[in-house]
Amino acid sequence: MSITDPIADAITKIRNAYLANHRTVSLNHSNVTEAIVKILTEENYINSYELIDRDTGKKIYRKQVFLNLRYTNEGKPVLRGIERVSRPGLRIYVNSGNIPSVYNNTGCAILSTNLGVLVDRDAREKKVGGEYICKIW
């Protein structure tokens, strides 16, 4: 079955895994999904990730991204919210001067730019705009 919006699918799987207090979650691989997961790791919202190649012997028919989710010592999720902003039906683009701050800079916005997928502060520093993919807090 094909997925119309792989980014929204990955974001929803991450959000649902945190709501269900799972320790791990598996996502379908795409280059943008991998870049978003890398940013989540750099921003300390998840512990680690691993890329798993397809292996028909183990019944893994697509390349997967396997995430280890991060929780506080009290057992609460580190990632309190993740929301898709731009979507296939309504693309949201921002220029370098209008990059939004998420929850007074306690969260971060993820942008797809011509320099790759960047966090909002890196995009401001490099003075590039792009598609506003999602926000995390």
Image (spheres, rainbow, N blue to C red):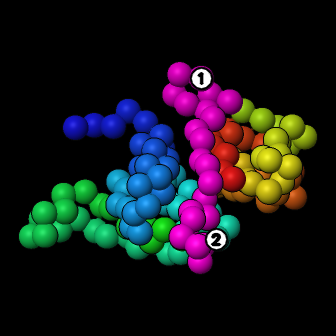
Where is residue 94, by image quadrant?
top right
Number of the front mark, 2 or 1: 2
In what element is the residue under mark 2?
Answer: loop
Q: Nearer the viewer, residue 69 or 129?
A: 69
- Residue wearing tag 1: 90
Q: What secondary structure is the stretch in magenta mostly built from?
A: loop
| Mark seen at residue 119 | none
Query: Quarter holding the N terminus?
Result: top left
Question: Magenta stretch containing residue 45, yes or no?
Answer: no
Residue depicted at x 61% and y 64%:
78
Q: Spot the residue most to the top.
A: 89
- Residue wearing tag 2: 44
Q: Position of residue 112 (x, y in %)?
A: 65, 46
Question: Magenta stretch containing residue 86, yes or no?
Answer: yes
Three-letter residue code for mark 1:
Leu
Above or below, 52 against 116 in this view is below
Q: Position of residue 97 (x, y in %)?
A: 90, 40
**Neighbour class for label 2 at 10 Å: few (<14), some, many (≥20)?**
some
Q: Where are the magenta residues, as a range?
A: 71-92
Q: How many marks?
A: 2
Three-letter residue code for mark 2:
Asn
User: Does residue 109 appear left or right of residue 57 in this picture?
Assistant: right
Q: Nearer the viewer, residue 46 or 94?
A: 46
- Comes first in the chain, label 2 or label 1: 2
Where is residue 96, by image quadrant?
top right
User: Does residue 115 appear left or right of residue 79 in this picture?
Assistant: right
Q: Position of residue 136 (x, y in %)?
A: 66, 51
Above or below, 113 against 64 in this view is above
The answer for how far apart the CA atoms under marks 2 and 1 are is 29 Å
User: Does residue 112 appear left or right of residue 14 in this picture?
Assistant: right
